[in-house]
Image (tube, rainbow, N blue to C red):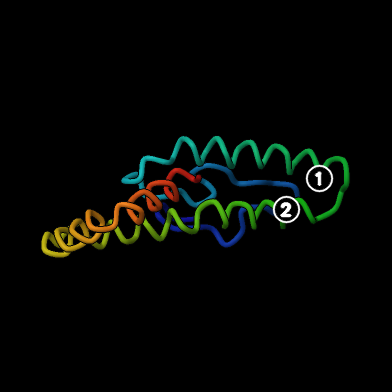
Amino acid sequence: HQPGTRPRRTAEAGAFLAGDASGGIDPVLGCGVALALTTGLAAARAAGRVLTSGSGSPEREYQHFVRRETRVRAAIAGGLSLLAGRPGLQRAVTRVLAAWPRASARLTRLVAGA
């Protein structure tokens, strides 16, 4: 796949894409290493299941896992990219998050994968 895009499949025929190969998130979030380790471990476990079971289920489970782990982070990265060249919008979002610290804390937990 092209850099900055996400592959259609992250697992097929016993092969698993992990880390940036599985559709890395914008580096602005700083979660690349954690995501690489998380998906790498999950890929290793899924590959082990393929070897023991021989079924396609581990590939599907892994694809769902990667989507679940990356969907919210990718959306947040997209939102931050949208803010990048818009100082007025940045100030407005900062005011909203300052007024709602629980929302700010929740976004932080989502990026961290918690």
Relative to 74, residue 52 above or below: above
**Is residue 110 or residue 17 the one in the foreground?**
110
Q: Quadrant of residue 56?
A: bottom right
Three-letter residue code for mark 1: Val
**Is residue 11 or residue 98 the one in the foreground?**
98
What residue is at 61 percent from the left and 53 percent from the top? 10
What residue is at 42 percent from the left and 41 percent from the top? 31
Three-letter residue code for mark 2: Glu
Question: Where is mark 2, residue-wise?
Answer: 59
Q: Quadrant of residue 100?
A: bottom left
Relative to 110, residue 96 above or below: below
Q: Are marks 2 and 1 in contact (CB under 8 Å)?
A: yes
Q: How many marks?
A: 2
What secondary structure is found at the residue carrying circle 2? helix
Question: Where is mark 1, residue-wise?
Answer: 50
Q: Which comes before the other along the chain, label 2 or label 1?
A: 1
Q: Quadrant of residue 78?
A: bottom left
Q: Is residue 63 left or right of residue 94?
A: right
Q: Is residue 86 left or right of residue 60?
A: left
CA distance for labels 2 and 1: 8 Å
Tag 2: Cα neighbours inside 10 Å, few (<14), some, or many (≥20)? Answer: many
What residue is at 76 percent from the left and 51 percent from the top? 58
Residue 3 location (% of width, % of height): 41, 52
Q: Which residue is the extreme one toward the right?
A: 53
What residue is at 52 percent from the left and 38 percent from the top? 36
Tag 1: Cα neighbours inside 10 Å, few (<14), some, or many (≥20)? Answer: some
Q: Is residue 111 left or right of residue 51?
A: left
Residue 18 location (% of width, % of height): 57, 43
**Which mark, residue 66?**
none
**Is residue 69 or residue 104 the one in the foreground?**
104
What secondary structure is found at the residue carrying circle 1? helix
Residue 104 location (% of width, % of height): 32, 52
